[in-house]
Amino acid sequence: MVAASDFVGRDVITVGDFQRDEILFLLDAADRFEKGHGTPLAGRVIATLFFEPSTRTRLSFEAAIGRLGGHAIGFAEGGVSSQSKGESLSDTVRVVEGYSDLLLIRHPREGAARLAAEYVDCPVVNCGDGAHQHPTQTFLDLYTIRREVGRLDNLEVVFAGDLRYGRAVHSLVTVLALFDARITLVSPGFLRLPEEQLEALESLGVSYRETESLEEALPDADVLYMTRVQRERFTDPLEYERFKDAYRLDLETLTHAREDLAILHPLPRVTEIAPEVDNKPHAAYFRQAHYGVAVRKALLALLLGCADEVLK
Ligand code: NCD
């Protein structure tokens, strides 16, 4: 049986740090935090160390902190921190640990959050490390799927777009193995899911197939997870130009989908979903961004051991 105390003081670096039952416990806690909570983080200070651009992740964390009565400190780009003077990440986090109770970190380098966690005793939450992982996005994606589709088990999930560099995809795709999903991967060959992720799916016994055609993938899908082509991860700008418009989901494409398909997207969207789709009941992506606050409230309160009042 999972208990709130199991979360206290933990780091959140990859989704693999959490068992299925723990994830379900977190999602149930998010339901409770969405309904109401008081100010369990009063007197707590949480640092947001964002060395890469962010709108949703940083602001929904800051909203969650503020709503729970806590206080957020931090910066929204590395250029305004002492990193620009040559300070190492390990020095920055050791210093900021002295100012705060928990560190939220986003960084362009894979493994940056793991490294930070080695230097500090307080919890560290990975808010995206390069093309590697984005575990809190995955928690809110699962929360969204459960809210929108009504269940997490035995779903047909289609991932489309940049499966090579998209860290939100990398986190979500392996967790779906815990819920017996059948997965379809839609991308041009250049943007395929990396080989080690495909091997992980195989070793977890996940049933998956790959195709370049979104139309072909859609008919049986319960969930479509659209993604942006990750311009900032390309070393060759011409390569980006070649693939940036690989897919565009519009009303015509949607004629291939079921009436009850849920469309998720971690956002930001560029051209991969036509605005005409936004008003369709399928379009869950703005609700998804909003659910992030409830999930992050629950996560912070659990990690800091302040969730008991709300969960009792
Ligand atoms: C994602 C990210 O930063 O990885 N955005 C987010 O956190 N909602 C996806 C993206 O940038 O495409």
Image: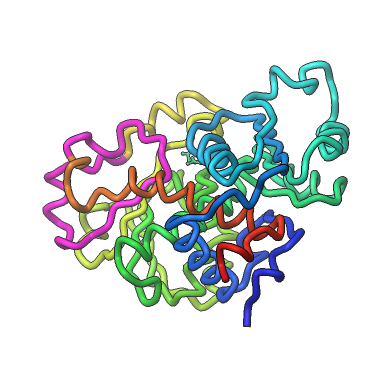
Q: Residue at x 18, y 42 (%)?
A: 279
Using the rendered image of the protein, determine whether residue 194 is visible from the camera's viewpoint: no
Quadrant housing residue 257: bottom left
For the residue pair 243 and 149, the one nearer the viewer reads as 149
Percent x, y of residue 218: 23, 59
- Answer left or right for 290 relative to 46: left
> What span is in magenta?
247-276
95 in relation to 111, above or below = above
**Where residue 185 sits: x, y (%)?**
39, 58
The quarter of the rendered structure image containing the C terminus is bottom right
User: From the viewer's perspective, is 161 left or right of 218?
Assistant: right
Q: Measured along the vertical axis of the image, is residue 153 above or below residue 46?
A: below
Q: Main secondary structure of the magenta part?
A: loop
| Closer to us: 40 or 4 | 40
Residue situated in front as seen by the camera: 272 or 151: 151
Picture colour scheme? rainbow
Q: Please state the horizontal and vertical placement of residue 130, each as a whole percent of the image.
A: 62, 40
Q: For the point 85% across and 30% down, which residue is it?
A: 88
Count of marks, rendered view: 0
* Outermost residue to the bottom: 1
The residue depicted at 74 percent of the width and 60 percent of the height is 10
Instruction: Mark yes or no: residue 28 visible.
Output: yes
Q: Tell whether position 231 is magenta.
A: no
Q: Quadrant of the N terminus?
A: bottom right
Place of residue 118 in the rendered image (x, y in percent of width and height, measured from the top left) = 85, 50
Name the residue: 52% across, 55% down: 37
Look at the image and say whether residue 261 sits in the magenta stretch.
yes
